[in-house]
Amino acid sequence: MGKNKVYIYKSFERFWHWTQALLIFFLAFTGFEIHGSISFFGYLNAVRYHNIAAYAFIVLIIFAIFWHLSTGEWKQYLPTLEHIRSQIDYYLFGIFRNAPHPTKKTVLSKLNPLQKLVYLGLKILVIPIMVISGLLYMFYRYPQKGGGIAGLNIGSIEPIALIHTFGAFLLITFVIAHLYLITTGTTITSNLRAMITGYEELEETEGDENKSSENSDEVKSPEKKQNIEVETVLVEKEII
Ligand code: HEM
C-alpha cells in the first residue's frame, strides 16, 4: 500500500502540545532552582516565575480538557492491551533490526498501545498530582505567614514537597523518553515535523482512513477542508 500525506494534528492540538512542553520545561527549570539544584534566576524570582507558569499551566489544562471532550479526541487515550506485547518487543528488539512498526498510525488512532497507557497515566495521575500538590504547596498555611487555607491543616509541608518533587522526576523521566521516541518514527524527524506542521506521511489503510488530505481535489479550499474536519468529528461523535 502507498503513503499519503494526512492532516493528523489539528492546530489547537499542536498549540496545546508545544505550550505544554514549554511550560513543563520552564516549571522543571524554576522548580529545581527552588529545590536548590541549580541557580539561575535567584530563589525569590524562581518562586515568582514558577507560580506564574503554574497558573498558565492550569489555564492551558482547562482549555485542553474542553478540547478533548468537545472533539471526542479523549477516545485516543482509551487503553488497550492489544498489540502491547509486540509494541514492547519492537522497542526492545525490532527497532534495532529495522523491523516494521507493529501498529499503524491513523487519524482515528494516532497512539500506539504503549503511548495510550503512558499518556493516560500522565493525564489522570502525574499531572493531577503535580497540580494538586503544587496548589497545596502554594496555599500551605506557613505558621510565620498566617493566611493560607486554614481548613487544610496539614501538619508539615514535607510530604507535599516530597510528592511534588517525586512527580517532577517522573515528568522529567517521561520527557527524556519522549525525546528519544520522537526520533523513532518513519524517519528521524517525521514525528517532530508532524507535530509542527500537522501533516504526516502515513500508510494507506484498508478503510481509507489515511486518505491524502493534500493531493485530493476535494480538500483544496480551506472551507471544504474545514467542512470535512467538522464532518469527521460529527461522524466520530456518531451524530451523523
Ligand atoms: C500547576 C502546576 C504546579 C504548581 C501549582 C506548582 C507549585 C509549586 C510551588 C508553590 C512550589 C514551592 C515554591 C516555594 O517554595 O515557595 C513548587 C516547587 C517545586 N515545583 Fe512546582 N508547581 C507546579 C508544577 C510543577 C511541574 C510541572 C514541575 C516539574 C516538572 C514542578 C517542579 C517543582 C519542583 C522541583 C519544586 C521544588 C520542590 C522542593 O524542593 O520542595 N512543579 N511548585
Image (cartoon, rainbow, N blue to C red):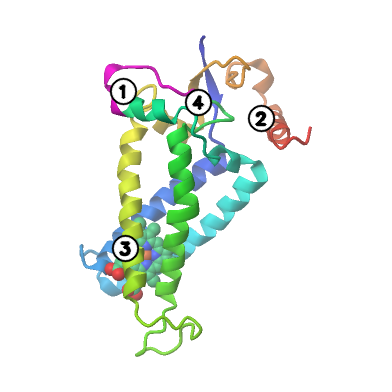
Disc 2 target residue? 222
Q: Determine whether the residue tagged by mark 2 lies in a helix, strand or loop.
A: helix
Rendered view: 207 above or below 192 = above
Question: In this orientation, which residue lies closer to the viewer: 14 or 139?
Answer: 139
Label 2, label 4: how many angstroms apart (C-alpha)?
25 Å
Rendered view: 37 above or below 215 = below
- The quadrant in which residue 78 appears is top right
Rendered view: 24 above or below 233 = below
Magenta-highlighted residues: 92-104
- The quadrant in which residue 88 appears is top left
At x 50%, y 26%, the residue is 105
Q: Compare marks 1 and 3 and give the one earlier in the sequence.
A: 1
Q: Determine whether the residue tagged by mark 4 lies in a helix, strand or loop.
A: loop
Q: What amino acid is found at the position of numbered circle 4 in the picture?
A: Lys
Q: Compare marks 3 and 4 and give the one earlier in the sequence.
A: 4
Label 2 vs label 4, nearer the camera: 4
In magenta segment, residue 93: yes
**Can residue 191 be seen?**
yes
Q: Compare marks 1 and 4 and give the one earlier in the sequence.
A: 1
Label 1, label 3: how many angstroms apart (C-alpha)?
33 Å
Q: What amino acid is found at the position of numbered circle 3 in the picture?
A: Thr
| Residues under numbered marks 2 and 1 in contact, where contact means CB atoms less than 8 Å apart | no
Magenta span dominant secondary structure: loop
Label 3, label 2: how many angstroms apart (C-alpha)?
46 Å
Label 3 vs label 2, nearer the camera: 3
Disc 4 target residue? 105
Callout 3 crowding tier (Cα within 10 Å): few <14, some 14–19, many ≥20:
some
Q: What amino acid is found at the position of numbered circle 2 in the picture?
A: Pro
Disc 3 target residue? 165
Disc 1 target residue? 95
At x 49%, y 51%, the residue is 123
